[in-house]
Amino acid sequence: MTAGLGEAALAGMVAGYAVAVPVGAIAALLISLTARTSLRIGSAAALGVATADGLYCALAVVGGAAVARLVEPVSGPLRWAAMVVLLALAARTAYTAWRARTDAPTVKAVRGLTSPGRAFLGLLALTVLNPSTVVYFTALVLGRQGDSDAVTAVVFVAAAFLASASWQLLLAAGGGLLGRVLTGPRGRFATATVSSVVIAVLAVGLVLG
């Protein structure tokens, strides 16, 4: 049981980092918001981003558990389909980063984020609008179904949330120097490439594991 929970925690952390690490407009907004306001407000905004990732992961786990019972007879092809979806997301992430490697991320100013509560809700709402996050988690969770129970599912979701939160808080705390490095063209290309590789490895692992 302990080993199973450990594996679920590790899988959740890897999944959380894979979806959180690519640096784009949300990360640039988070960093600039912290620089313009305070670490307290930036940290609240970071937790808003991580909460959106955690909510999407939880929805994917709940939905995946329900769907898994219906599609158990075709669990083999389902794993292959999930692998294809994840590989497509990995390729899209890498291709987008390659196309935009010489451009700065587009950051729209969001007014009114002058308190931790508003910053949390504002970044939560903006992150929820990213549909690729729920596609990623749904494909990953459906591909993993078959040997998970409620406890391991909770551990998986919690680990994914903590991984995302730790990365977003690092961006907020790093602010200045770290922000300039990661939000520059090379930094965004590097983080997107790492994320693409991790997602591709997870995709292949669904079938080989």
Image (cartoon, rainbow, N blue to C red):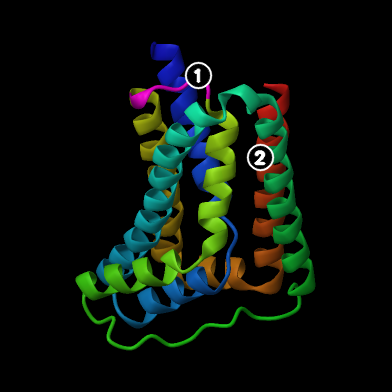
Q: Is residue 14 magenta?
A: no
Camera-nearest residue between 147 and 52: 147
**Magenta stretch mostly in which secondary structure?**
loop
Residue 193 % position (x, y):
72, 54
Helix or strand or loop: what does disc 1 sit on? loop
171 vs 81, nearest the viewer: 81
Kind of residue indicated by mark 1: Asp
The 10 Å Cα crowd at callout 2, few under 14, some 14 to 19, many 20 or more, is: many
**Residue 9, image quadrant:** top left
For mark 1, what is the residue? 147
Q: Which residue is mark 2?
A: 82
Q: Quadrant of residue 121?
A: bottom left
Please state the total of marks drawn on the protein image.
Answer: 2
- List x then y, in percent, for residue 93: 70, 59
In front: 92, or 84?
Answer: 84
Nearest to N terminus: mark 2 or mark 1: 2
Q: Is residue 112 above or below residue 172?
A: below
Q: Is residue 113 above or below residue 159?
A: below
Q: Amino acid at mark 2?
A: Ala
Question: Residue 50 at what x, y percent from top left?
Answer: 39, 55
- How far is mark 2 from mark 1, CA to CA? 16 Å
Q: Residue at x 44, y 66 (%)?
A: 127
Magenta range is 146-150
Residue at the spot x=53%, y=22% of the render?
146
